[in-house]
Image: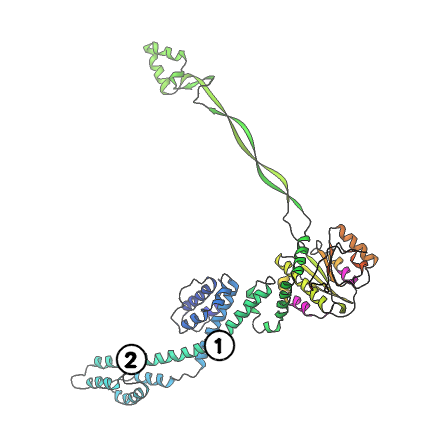
Amino acid sequence: MPNFSRFIHFGNIADTETRKQIAENIFMELYDEQSQPISNATNFSIAISDILDNTTLHEMCKDNEELSGKITSDILDFVNRTQKQISRTDNPFVDEVMQYQQFVETNKKTFSDNWNLTKPFIDKTYNKNVIDTEFYEEEFQKCFNEKGKNRTQFDSVKEHFMDKWRELFYKKQVDWELQIIDSERKQFCEELYRKIEELKKLQEILSPFTNELGRLWDMSGGRWRNTNFNILKRYAELMQRDKLLQELAEMLGRMQQAEQEYEEELFADVRPKTVWKVETVAKADLIGVHESDDISSALPSEFALLADSTTEILFYKKFTEKKLQTFEFQGRTQEIINEEFQNKRPKAKEDVQGPFIICIDTSGSMHGTPEIVAKTLCFAILKIAIRDNRKCYLISFSTGIETLNLTDLKNSLHKIIRFLSMSFHGGTDATPAMREALQMLTTQDYKKADVIMVSDFVMPPFDETTQKLITLAKTNKTKFHSLVIGTSQNKGVIKDFDNNWLYDANSPAGVLSLVKNIRIL
């Protein structure tokens, strides 16, 4: 459970134990919807219960400790802020409290003066059916007659009157505070529920870019409005409509497998073994003579002792001490047991899908439909990379290159949004991008990556050095894939790729058509 010490130890409502109980109950109701009722020791119990009465709030927080903790902290901050506001606000009952305190000090000597001030105030403030001053005046007068000089009687009437009065203005005080709390609660709920609904939408848009709802909740303090999440929503919708682009991304993801590696593992093995089990009770084989008390197996010489009364006692003595000379028999049975031993064997390491290196043509010739196709495919690949926990290196190129090392994809959301928001312009030169990709293949993070280039390929072919480096990379099992947008590609460029797909925006169907391994003339 998160630490709410800032509220528990520095809160300004109730006592420490009550504040601790409030914090724990709010958190548990959000986290698993199982908690004790909020303590009625404070005026905030109804407000807190009303705040928690929201289906989306429970839906988003259930089993999410981080988000439950952050929203609990927000609710506790609301409680403290509101209590401070109540303390700062002019209390409309100050005069009544002072008048009450003054009457507390009255006695029989000062009663007449104090009562002449108190009675008109009570009559003006409260209805007679609520507190009847005439009744109390009569009771007080009885205390002053000759038969009512007992001080205890006066104190009893005074205490009864004060209890009734205190109950009335305490209720007014509570109602006043509850009005302030409820007003603040409405504003707090409006903001809280708006944020939780936005978070729900973000979760749908950003999945699987991030499932860290607690981190997104931290961004909600005005920063959501500065982040163009609509761009992600747009490309998510485009990807859903363009199923073939999504299939291509999945296909590239399946093709990009890390090389199978093996490791040696120890394992427990068993082998059968035949053993002879000795059974001493069975009289199968005579193996010798030993001492015992087995009369049936005693040697004849031992029975000879019984023939003479002088030696007979010796026989009994040897029998008692189990020292008779007897034949020893032994039986054996054959038994098969499993003998355990350690053995070694090669074990294939779990397949680890490698990273992606994506080269996106951002030149002016890609403006329009090609730009949308390129970004949508990039978006689809990024989602696969995040889903499968794979690294991704993004290279955008025109006359120069820009790179995004998305090793930590879940924390690179702003970089992805920036790329998807950028405009395409400038000329086309793919060689620097390919050289950058080849350089990344020599690094530890991307040595097992495959390279994907998306372009219209209206460009000069790669130079001889770059072509040789591509050939060398292929010997290390790197695959080079291309998505060709349009039909004006330079065949001399795409021949360097292992697999080529075509996006023909002018196809009769008006959608993506994929042609693997475009014929290179």
In depth, the one of 512 and 339 nearer the eye is 512
Residue found farthest to the top: 307
Q: Is residue 367 above or below residue 476?
A: below
Q: Residue furthest front?
A: 508
Compared with residue 293, is residue 38 higher up or lower down, i.e. above or below? below
Q: Amino acid at mark 1?
A: Gln
Sequence-first tag of 2 and 1: 2
Q: Residues within 10 Å of mark 2 (few under 14, many from 20)?
A: few
Please identify the quadrant where the C terminus is shown. Answer: bottom right
Q: Is residue 417 above or below residue 111?
A: above
Circle 1 Cα neighbour tier, 10 Å, few/some/many (<14 / 14–19 / ≥20): few
Task: Identify the image quadrant of residue 267.
Answer: top right
- Secondary structure under badge 1? helix
- Residue visible at 64% across and 50% down in the picture: 351
Q: Position of residue 212 (x, y in %)?
A: 57, 63
Q: Which residue is mark 1?
A: 187
Residue 461 included in the magenta stretch of the image: no
Residue 394's spot in the image, x, y percent? 70, 62
Between residues 339 and 324, which one lies in front from this camera angle?
339
Q: Which mark is residue 164?
A: 2
Which amino acid lies under the numbered mark 2 shown in the image of this protein? Lys
C-alpha distance separating marks 2 and 1: 35 Å
- Residue 417 visible, this orientation: yes
Q: Secondary structure at mark 2?
A: helix
For this view, does 116 lie left or right of residue 510?
left
Q: Is residue 18 left or right of residue 202?
A: left
Range of magenta residues: 414-436
Q: Are marks 2 and 1 in contact (CB under 8 Å)?
A: no
Residue at far left of view: 147
